Image (tube, grey):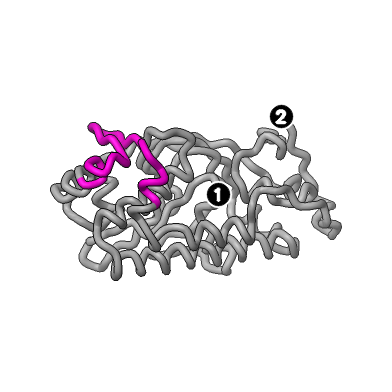
Amino acid sequence: MTFVRQSGIQNKLLRRFPEDAFDLLELEPIDLPVKHSLVLARKPIEHVCFLESGLASMVAESADGKSVEIRHIGREGIAGYPVVLGVDRSPNGAFMQVPGHGLHVATEDFLPILEHAEVRKLLLRYIHTCELQLAHTALAAAKFNVHQRLARWLLMCHDRIDSNDLPLTHEFLALMLGVRRASVTDELHILEGMHAIKSTRGNVRILDRDMLMEIAGGCYGVPEQEYERLIGDSPQPSTFRTHLNGNRHHHML
């Protein structure tokens, strides 16, 4: 068992866990290289993973193999969250696009924590923000042009990566936008012409975040505001005193 102190956690959900509930989690550090699968489509979800750094993509795939990114997961969230809803697998997969690290826990060890009312409330609020992000992805696809959608995705990446340099490949950007890779260069040039970014091979540097927000317009911001309203980043008080304390595990560095 590797011990983890809550005060050193970067994941915003774990930071919000009541202390006594956090102490019950059998968390294990995990390296998350590029392309590492967090959730395999249509396979049992064996672990849930709280990202500490890096960026993961949740991807929807059609029956004939077409795929598109539908949302991001970073240190604000958790991969494998369908288990919170009583679902053991999903048609959607999730894998790392930007390397990082995280803390994962076996699903069978995670599920008892959902008996904690505050944890369950927190995770259901998080899932609400995930649904809202999906809804605004659909809104952006239907009502906004491609460079506005690209500005939105770049802002969402920037929210989750501690750098103005985003190590994003054209392959990833094409997956984000649901366009051919050849179209990505044109869209990046539009944002470069507005002096919002600087694009080089395998990297997008954010030069002017305010300009990106202006370009994205109404397709960015609502899910982010809802996350901050419902979850924020302040620790919750300790409230969990149930029979689960009999199996208590203490985590410390």
Q: Amino acid at mark 2?
A: Leu
Note whether residue 129 is visible.
yes
Note whether residue 36 is visible.
no
In x, y percent, where is residue 173? 27, 47
In x, y percent, where is residue 21? 75, 52
Task: Identify which residue is drawn at 23% across, 61% down.
Answer: 66
Q: Amino acid at mark 1?
A: Glu
Q: Residue furthest left?
A: 182
Total count of labels? 2
Tell me if 6 is positioned left or right of 34 in this view.
right
In this figure, which residue is indicated by the disc labeled 2?
Answer: 253
Tell me if 60 is positioned left or right of 130 in this view.
left
As drawn, the label of residue 165 is none
Q: Looking at the picture, does residue 33 appear above or below residue 146?
A: above
Q: Earlier in the sequence, mark 1 or mark 2?
A: 1
Q: Secondary structure at mark 1?
A: loop
Task: Identify which residue is drawn at 47% across, 45% down.
Answer: 159
Residue placed most toward the observer, 230 or 237: 230
In this figure, which residue is indicated by the disc labeled 1?
Answer: 76
Tell me if 194 is positioned left or right of 234 in this view.
left
Task: Identify which residue is drawn at 23% across, 32% down.
Answer: 201
